[in-house]
């Protein structure tokens, strides 16, 4: 498994629904904090705190453009999540196969 070199755990960073929504928002484009704040019913300070957690986990990159700070998704740390979920896919597949066999046997 890939070990995260970030200060915060990627799993912990995405545990919050607001941060997950922020990652989706930043997936396709770079955005200034003012524009991000407009998308959420929370204060700019709260948005900034969420972005800080995401940044510490390596999930967003921030850069200064003039007087504003812009944020963009950095997807590389998500590989850790993908690897973790892939490990458990074998169990899901087994359970679905067993369910399929059960349902088909019940109809015979």
Image (tube, rainbow, N blue to C red):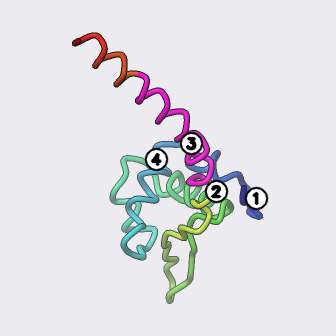
Q: Residue at x 56, y 48 (%)?
A: 86
The C terminus, quarter of image: top left
Q: Name the residue carrying label 3.
A: 15
As drawn, the residue found furthest toward the front would be 108
The kind of secondary structure element at disc 4 is: helix
**For residue 29: magenta?**
no
Where in the figure is residue 37, as x and y percent of width and height? 40, 59
Q: CA distance from mark 1 to mark 3?
A: 18 Å
The boundaries of the magenta stretch are 81-98
Q: CA distance from mark 1 to mark 2?
A: 7 Å
- Predominant secondary structure in magenta? helix
- How many residues crowd around disc 2 within 10 Å: few (fewer than 14), some, or many (20 or more)? some
Q: Name the residue carrying label 1.
A: 3
Q: Nearer the viewer, mark 4 or mark 2?
A: 2
Q: Earlier in the sequence, mark 1 or mark 2?
A: 1
- Label 2 near label 1: C-beta < 8 Å? yes
In the depicted structure, whether residue 75 falls above or below residue 13: below
Along the viewing direction, whichever of 43 and 21 lies nearer the viewer: 21
Q: Which mark, residue 80?
A: 2
């Amino acid at each position: 498994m890939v070990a995260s070199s970030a200060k915060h755990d990627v799993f912990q960073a995405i545990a919050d629904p607001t941060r997950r929504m922020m990652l989706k928002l930043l997936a396709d484009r770079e955005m200034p904090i003012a524009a991000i704040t407009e998308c959420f019913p929370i204060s700019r300070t709260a948005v900034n705190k969420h972005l800080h957690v995401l940044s510490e986990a390596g999930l967003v990159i921030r850069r200064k453009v003039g007087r504003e700070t812009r944020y963009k998704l950095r997807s590389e740390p998500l590989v850790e999540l993908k690897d973790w979920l892939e490990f458990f896919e074998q169990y899901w597949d087994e359970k679905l196969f067993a369910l399929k066999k059960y349902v088909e046997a019940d109809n015979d």
